[in-house]
Image (cartoon, helix red, strand yellow):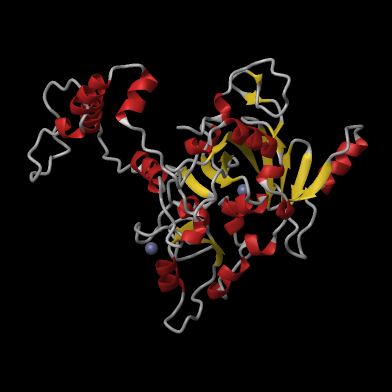
Amino acid sequence: MAASSAAGCSTSSNANDDIPTYEYIDINTKPFHVATFENLWKQTLNPKYYSIRDVHQETDEEFAEDIGIPTGTVEELKVICNPDTLRCHPENQPPDTDVVPADPGLMTLRMRKRRQDYRETLIRAQTCRQDLYAAELENLAIGKKPVDPEDLLPEGEIILSVNVLFPVITERFKHFKARQNLQVLGSQKLTDLRDAICCLSDLQVCGEFSDTPDMAPEFISKDLFKSAFLFLEGIFYNDMRYPECKDLSQTVREWAESHDMPTFQTAKMEETTFRDLKLKVGYPYLYCHQGDCEHVVLITDIRLAHRDDCLDLKLYPLLTYKHRMISRRCAVCNLYISRWMTTNDSFAPTDPCLFCDICFRMLHYDPEGKKLGDFQAFPYVDPGAFN
Ligand SMILES: [Zn+2]
Ligand SMILES: [Zn+2]
């Protein structure tokens, strides 16, 4: 790709602070200003290498000269590497992808065979779509063009890859890091990233709703508690878009001041674009919302947009990976994902007990919606709700 990776820059003693150099090798760079780095890039690169519109088709002669081989060899390579030579079935006969030749030479086929053999040894068949799903999500938007030409990505836009780690909400998360990967544009506001991060804490409903189950969806935490901050390079970027937003960083800043630490600055998340930032690639930053739901945020890469990237402005921030979580199903039907948790419930086999919306209502209310028996009901948000 013409737009080379920022994270790929090697360690050097370059005096220019606007070029990312590694502070700790292979871990994180020193801080640099995103927009200045972007401009340096554009000054250096020939626009034809990152242009989205003017696609320069390299001729065989140019290609031969580039890699230093005779033009005749290029012709020969074209014949040998033609995808048609890979076909082992007639075109009108679809291949059976489950059949692997007995002694495959290709590494991909050998790996497929190993996986198939392993699956046969499993006692319980697990339908795990994680691998397939992750790859699908990443490939879904490659080279995607917008319906409205107005939404085409501007020429020379920069794309930042962001890893957002989930806080440890289940025991399993202590052993591996569930995460969400997103691509944001340099021109986007920090609030665009904040809105794209999906976290269970935002969907929690506080309260007991056994008397009024229809009221529950109106009380999700995201609507009630809108404050959040991103802490990047010693600056707290607060989300202050709504009148009810509070400066969540105040407590931390006051604590820092009383402990003889340097004074931290604050800025508004909605007034800052990624281009305005000074940051380190690969360095763990903090995103905090819902009071104390803390996520580690890493910028893993900064690069110029390429025509193979998603070209639809409206799809950014673009989700490229999302960890899938196991859902807990209803105790009655064992089919649908749980939506309610009850306690002190004489109808339930366990205490607490999880129910889907349909079973919960059928079991606990008469056809007129009158509550039957004595129990407490709390809306339950399943970790798999975002799958
Ligand atoms: Zn969260
Ligand atoms: Zn059910």
Closer-to-camera residue (91/250): 91
**Which residue extends farthest bottom?**
368
Identify the image quadrant of the N terminus.
top left
Image point (48%, 80%), residue name: 369
Closer-to-camera residue (339/341): 339
Q: Quadrant of ligand 2?
A: bottom left
Query: In which quarter of the view is residue 27 placed?
Result: top right
Image point (54%, 46%), residue name: 155
Q: Is residue 304 left or right of residue 130?
A: right
Query: In which quarter of the view is residue 136 placed?
Result: top left
Closer-to-camera residue (93/257): 93
Residue 293 can be seen in this image? no
Residue 50 can be seen in this image? yes
| Marker count (numbered) | 0
Q: Position of residue 283 (x, y in %)?
A: 65, 30
Image point (58%, 29%), residue name: 6
Q: Is residue 250 left or right of residue 140?
A: right
Q: Relative to 209, does residue 280 appear above or below in the rendering?
A: above
Q: Relative to 272, does residue 259 appear above or below in the rendering?
A: above
Q: Position of residue 230 (x, y in %)?
A: 71, 45
Q: Position of residue 3 (x, y in %)?
A: 51, 34
Q: Is residue 197 left or right of residue 294?
A: left
Image point (48%, 35%), residue name: 49
Q: Position of residue 228 (x, y in %)?
A: 71, 52
Closer-to-camera residue (86/107): 86
